[in-house]
Image (cartoon, rainbow, N blue to C red):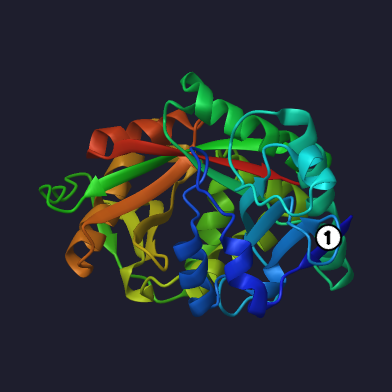
Amino acid sequence: MIFRPIVLQELDAVLAHVRPDSSTAVSADLVRSRLATGEYRPGWIWVAEPGPGRAPMALAIWWGRPWDTFPSSLDALFAAPSPVASLSDSRRRTPWAASHSADPRTAIAAALLTAAHQVFAAGGLAVAPPFHLFLPPDWRDRSDVAAAVAWRRSAAAVAGLRLTTERLRFEWATDRRVPALSERLRFTPEPADEMFVDLVRRVLPGSLESGCARESLLVGADAQARSEVAFYRQEMLGKRAWWRIARTTTGQVVGFGIPSRNSAVPTVGHLGVLPEFRGRGFAAEILAEVTRILAVETDSPVIRGDTDASNHPMVGAFELVGYRDHARRLVLSAD
C-alpha cells in the first residue's frame, strides 16, 4: 500500500472521486478554490493507493492559512465504500462516499492519517492537526450522518486523535436589530496588548472552554494568554481597533471582547468575564457589544461564534442575544 501526497498534475483525476456526504461539505470545487488561495496545498492532500496508477482507496485533505508552514486541521477524510474490493480491482473507480462499512474504511483511513502524521512530525510539526467535522445540530438522530461520522471518528482515534470536543456553532443574521447598548457596562478601546494578555490570563481559571483550559494546563496560563492574544492580533483578520475592555459604571474591569473575522465571515472571536463577576449575566452584555461592533463595522449577512456544548453560560448568552444554533463542530484532537 502506498500513502503519499498528490502532485498537482493528477488533481482532476483525484477529485473525480470526491463526493460530499452528510458529514462534510468539502467538494471538488471547494478543493480547487482553496488550492488557489493557499489554504489547501498538494502536500496536504494525501491518497492511499494499492500501487502506482491504481485507483486510490482513501483521501485526506488538510487545511491551513496561506502563510502556515504546516496544516492547522484535517478538513476531510474519504474512503471507498468497499476498500477490499478496490484492492482486488485496481481499475474500479468507485467514488468515496458514506455508506457504512466501518472496519475496512477505518483501517485504510487510519493508516493514511498515520503515514501523513509521521511525515508532518519529521518535518517539525509537534502535534498532529485536529480533525474538524462540521455537522447539523441533530446529527446523532440522523442515521446517515451518524454512520458517516462513526468510521471517520474511529480512524482518527487509531491515528492518535482520541480527544473529542463538541462545539455548538451559533449564527446571528445582521438584518436583525443591532443589540442595544448595555446599561451596566461601558466599553472602551485599549491600545495596550498587555492589558488583554493580563485579562485573558485572569479568565482562564475555571474556564468552561475545554481547549483553552487544556492548553493552559500544558503550557501555563501566561503562555496561553500570550498565544491567544497573538493569534487574534496576527493571524485572524479582524481589526485591532474593534477590541474592547468592559467596565462597570464605577470603572471596575469586568472582562473583555475581541471581535474578529476569518477568511469567510465575522466571528465573535474571544470574550471573557473575570471570575469575581461571573454569574451576573455580563457575558451576554459583552457578546451583545461584540455583535454590535461587527454588525456596524462589516457588511457580512451573518456573524458566527462557537462554544463548547458543555459551556452552558456561554450557550445561554448566545441564545439571549438572539443567535441561532445552526450547526455542530466535532473536534477530534491528539492527547
Q: Say which quarter of the image contains residue 102.
A: top right
Check the image and report above or below for 289 versus 234.
Answer: above
Q: Amino acid at mark 1?
A: Phe
Check the image and report above or below for 10 versus 165.
Answer: below
- Residue visible at 65% across and 79% down in the picture: 9
What x and y, as percent, mark residue 293? 24, 62
Q: Is residue 5 left or right of residue 138?
A: right
What x and y, as percent, mark residue 13? 62, 66
Nearest the viewer among 190 and 63 is 63
**Label total for image:** 1
- Residue at image mark 1: 3
Is residue 291 visible in this depiction of the protein? yes
- Residue visible at 70% across and 50% down in the picture: 92
Q: Quarter of the image containing the C terminus?
A: top right
What x and y, as percent, mark residue 294? 26, 61
- Residue visible at 27% across and 59% down in the picture: 187
- Residue visible at 56% across and 44% down in the picture: 133
Q: Residues within 10 Å of mark 1 (few under 14, many from 20)?
A: many
What x and y, as percent, mark residue 308? 51, 37
Q: Secondary structure at mark 1?
A: strand
Check the image and report above or below for 51 versus 124.
Answer: above
